[in-house]
Image: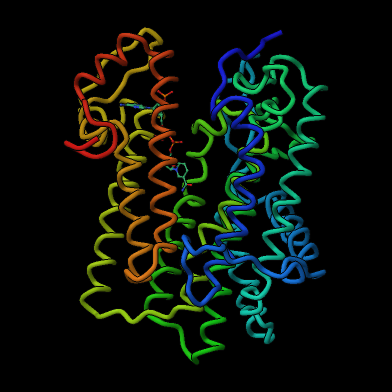
Amino acid sequence: MHTTTEKEFGGTLGATCIPVFLPLTVLYLLCVCRSPVASVIQWPPVLPPTAQLWDPLAPVLILGWMALQSFFYLLPMGKLSEGMVLKDGSRLKYPINGFYALCITAVLLTLSLWLGMPLGYLFELLLPLAVCAIGVSFLLSLYLYICSFWAPHHALAQGGNTGNPLYDFFMGRELNPRIGSFDLKYFCELRPGLIGWVVINFGMLMKEVELRDSASLAMILVNGFQLLYVADALWNEEAVLTTMDIVHDGFGFMLVFGDLAWVPFTYSLQAAFLVVHPQSLSPLGATAIVTLNGAGYYIFRKSNSQKNQFRRDPTHPSVANLETIATATGKRLLVSGWWGLVRHPNYLGDLLMALAWSLPCGFNHLLPYFYVVYFTVLLIHREARDERHCRAKYGLAWDSYCRHVPYRIFPYIY
Ligand code: NDP
């Protein structure tokens, strides 16, 4: 049997502390963002009365939401696509219908507005919803951990099989856990959390309308930018099949919690912040922020599409003329075009967008910049992980690529 020997994320200590620390961080940030001072460094820290952490409506909404998105996943819409080749030589099939799920959700939201449902109430429910999403993450991770002992050995992930229960629970033992043809990791990666994030944002916008009769420009920009990001991810859903998360990582607490609790509740902090701390934005400021988001999106989309196209069909006219280097695996690496600028141009674009999402919240608080800071740390760590995998995969060819393209994310800086 394959046993993992190398540990990531601080090993057993990290795997023990992160599942405690990160859920508390989500709840803490939500409390801070709703407090009048909104200071992340306030002492003593803002703690909510326990009554604010629970609402019987919250589990109904979270479970109903998961069931609704599962139903959309199972609808026979869109095409079926094959994933990468697995250890046993087989390829799994995945439905590419996430964008349809987003569209149907948008129709249902419009309908609920028309029926007079108070979507702004999501603001009051943020804490109980986050508590339930965290609870669901723990339960699902436990289920996945237990079920993984029935999985065949070739279905186990490379990283989550040390034999240490805490570490393996955190990293995930099984690579592609499924119930029948329902792929749990693929479903969680882009559906409930990502679509949930934009629904929460919209709820914050409606709360602002309730409080101040109209939505502010800052709120509209944050909603618009993040909707573009989510719609783009779902439009290009097939690309997720080649990511580290799907191809390499097991499905354990790290990904489950990230997908179901961290993304929807911390990525929507800017919108929640704006409900309590309205900001005015000059037309010039707004234009500059829109331009920054546009530039980030352009770099992000173009670089991701270039690599995806190259990996799908290197003879395609849009990539055929790019300079490449050969590797011992038979795959080639791009050394010109976007991937000749830095080794992760897609991360650069993503970070520019992250900054553009925070700027509408002004400069008086640190909290709206939490996402940029966290995301920079995440992408630097992710880049290092990817680099290790690529060096192991491509050996000398990877070293040669690094010599050709010395900067990782920021040209001439890092
Ligand atoms: P990437 O899309 O950056 O893919 C990395 C892989 O690309 C490598 O493992 C290698 O795989 C291939 N590759 C690397 N360099 C080259 C090259 N020069 N030529 C050809 N292929 C190359 O991986 P991620 O999954 O990290 O990111 C995908 C997107 O998702 C990014 O835009 C990122 O910003 C975004 N993201 C967003 C997050 C969020 O929370 N908002 C979280 C994580 C990612 P191989 O050679 O095997 O094809």
- Residue 346 position within the rendered picture, expressed as x and y whole percent measured from the top left: 34, 41
| Residue at (80% x, 65% y) in the render | 60
| Residue at (33% x, 82% y) in the render | 280
- Residue 406 position within the rendered picture, expressed as x and y whole percent measured from the top left: 21, 26
Vertical arrangement, residue 40 with respect to residue 123, above or below: above
Give the side of residue 169 with respect to residue 60, left or right.
Answer: left
The image quadrant of residue 157 is: top right
Q: Residue furthest front?
A: 44
**Quarter of the image where the N terminus is located:** top right
Vertical arrangement, residue 219 with respect to residue 358, above or below: below
Q: Residue furthest bottom?
A: 213
Is residue 299 or residue 134 the one in the foreground? 134
Is residue 120 or residue 74 the one in the foreground? 120
Give the colour scheme shown. Answer: rainbow
Give the side of residue 202 with respect to residue 297, left or right.
Answer: right
Vertical arrangement, residue 280 with respect to residue 125, above or below: below
- Residue 397 position within the rendered picture, expressed as x and y whole percent measured from the top left: 30, 12
- Residue 129 position within the rendered picture, expressed as x and y whole percent measured from the top left: 70, 63
Is residue 233 or residue 47 the one in the foreground? 47
